Image: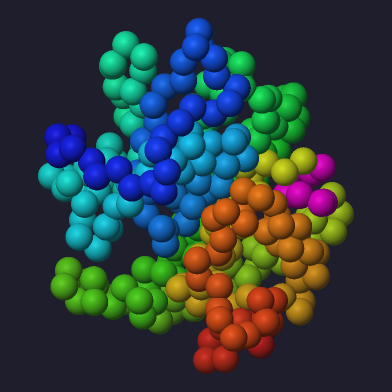
Amino acid sequence: MATTTPNIEHSRPLRRPSHYTDHNMPPLLTFYGARLAPNPRRVAVFLAEHGLYEGAGYAYVDIDMYKGEHKRGGKYETPNRKVPMMTITLEDGSTDTIGESLAICRYVEESQVATGGERVRLFGCGPLQRAKVEMWTRRVELELLFSSVGKAWYHGPTLAPMRKSSGLTAHTSELQLGMRTAQRFYKEVERELQAKGPFLAGEDFTVADITLLCVLDFGAGPVQVPMLWSKLPHLLAWHVRVSARESVRLHKDPYRPQGSPIYADRNVIGVQGSSKL
């Protein structure tokens, strides 16, 4: 891990959340993210749901991914050379580091409960709900982010300079496959919400909803995955409902199009097979 002292960026001095007392000191949290990446946004929304805000619960460091600040030997080298990362400084001065979005989220939720914080249960309550939250979170990660949106992102136009400098090749067939499989996943979520809504894992808002929101917005934004809202009324209603939460309003969709209706169909023209999606 690089030893460079971080340049902490936040709008106001860091202070403790109100539920901590002098006999219940919180750890000092420093969150390393990137404003336009979906996983750091996921953690930021999760933190806000727990009453932790930039400058009021954690310090924030914005990593420049294009400069490789998170890579090996970089200014803010992370454990897995990805973002986000969180460092934790305890009352005795010892520090530790966590990588991976869900690991950070789980630490925050469990430590808040252990120190007397408000009992926010974004990983679910009881064995069945926790299992459903885990199932949908993993499905969004594996089937939507990695296999669909991620595939389209890697083979899409935005990463063309990176592929050229690295001697890599894009395949149009993989780009189109990623876009089609993403839309099929949205159709499945549409059916799930219609049958069991209002949220992805049932009656309660959970980390599964945060994960889907951040991946969906990223896909509809720079990845240019087709977003056919007119054919997905229950998914649209879910998106409106989730976007109205204070935590999401604080960390809005950074890719939202300007000058057009938010829920107009997007990215349809020029996509092969879009009429069949």
Predominant SS of the magenta segment: loop
Q: Residue at x 41, y 69 (%)?
A: 153
User: Nearest the camera: 255 or 175?
Assistant: 255
Q: Is residue 251 magenta?
A: no
Quarter of the image that includes the N terminus: top left
Q: Residue at x 63, y 70 (%)?
A: 183
Q: Is residue 202 magenta?
A: yes
User: Nearest the camera: 242 or 268?
Assistant: 242
- In this view, 1 is above or below 226: above
Q: Residue at x 46, y 31 (%)?
A: 15
Identify the residue at the far bottom of this view: 270
Q: Residue at x 36, y 80 (%)?
A: 157
- On the question of residue 145 being in view, the answer is yes
Q: Which residues are magenta?
A: 197-203
- On the question of residue 139 being in view, the answer is no
Residue 229: image quadrant is bottom right
Q: How many marks?
A: 0
Query: Residue 50: image x %, image y %?
Result: 60, 35
Residue 168: image quadrant is bottom left
Query: Residue 114: image x %, image y %?
Result: 57, 15
Query: Residue 133: image x %, image y %?
Result: 67, 39
